[in-house]
């Protein structure tokens, strides 16, 4: 099965000052960024996830990580925001470090947001 290009699933190309590949879901205002080592989905106020939505997303991510990456250990140090969970393997700061993180901070007012990131192994951090 081929992975569709973001434009094929209705995402619009967004301008990125850093030159990274970025798209936006215009309906939900979710940003997709793709770099050689990572891909991420991010939300920002006023379109940040609510606490209930973030908890629901965390439930889905936990199930996906358990199914797709069963040997990836939970990292209790991956903490940021009110709702957070991370799974990582490899020493911190090395190319062998890879994993999945979900951070959500729905209670930060105008700074509310969230991030779901997947980092591939074999790249500098």
Image: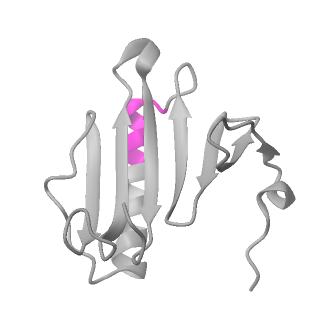
Relative horizontal placement of residue 85, taking residue 26 as reference (left or right): left
Quarter occupied by the N terminus:
bottom right
Quarter of the view holding residue 6: bottom right
Task: Name the spot of residue 85 as percent of width and height, x first.
Answer: 27, 53
Report the magenta residues as a range. Answer: 49-56
Indicate the colouring scheme.
Answer: one colour
Relative horizontal placement of residue 86, taking residue 6 as reference (left or right): left
- The residue lying at 53 percent from left, 41 percent from top is 42
Say if residue 62 shows up in the picture.
Answer: no
Q: Is residue 25 above or below residue 107?
A: below
- The residue lying at 45 percent from left, 55 percent from top is 117
Relative horizontal placement of residue 103, taking residue 76 as reference (left or right): right
Q: Nearer the viewer, residue 31 or 47?
A: 31
Task: Name the spot of residue 71 as percent of width and height, x first.
Answer: 26, 83
**Residue 27 falls inside the magenta stretch:** no
Task: Look at the magenta stretch and give its main secondary structure.
Answer: helix
Residue furthest left in the image: 76
Q: Is residue 10 above or below residue 120?
A: above
Task: Name the spot of residue 31 as percent of width and height, x first.
Answer: 63, 42
Quarter of the view holding residue 66: bottom left
Q: Nearer the viewer, residue 125 or 1?
A: 125
Task: Name the spot of residue 47 as percent of width and height, x first.
Answer: 57, 26
């Amino acid at each position: 099965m081929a992975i569709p290009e973001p434009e094929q699933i209705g995402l619009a190309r967004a301008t990125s000052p850093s030159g990274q590949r970025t798209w936006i879901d215009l309906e939900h205002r979710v940003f997709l960024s793709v770099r050689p080592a990572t891909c991420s989905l991010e939300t920002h106020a006023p379109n940040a996830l609510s606490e209930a939505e973030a908890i629901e997303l965390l439930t889905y991510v936990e199930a996906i990580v358990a199914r797709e990456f069963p040997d990836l250990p939970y990292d209790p140090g991956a903490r940021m925001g009110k709702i957070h969970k991370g799974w990582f393997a490899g020493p911190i700061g090395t190319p062998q470090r890879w994993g999945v993180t979900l951070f959500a901070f729905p209670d930060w007012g105008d700074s509310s947001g969230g991030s779901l990131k997947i980092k591939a192994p074999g790249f500098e951090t």
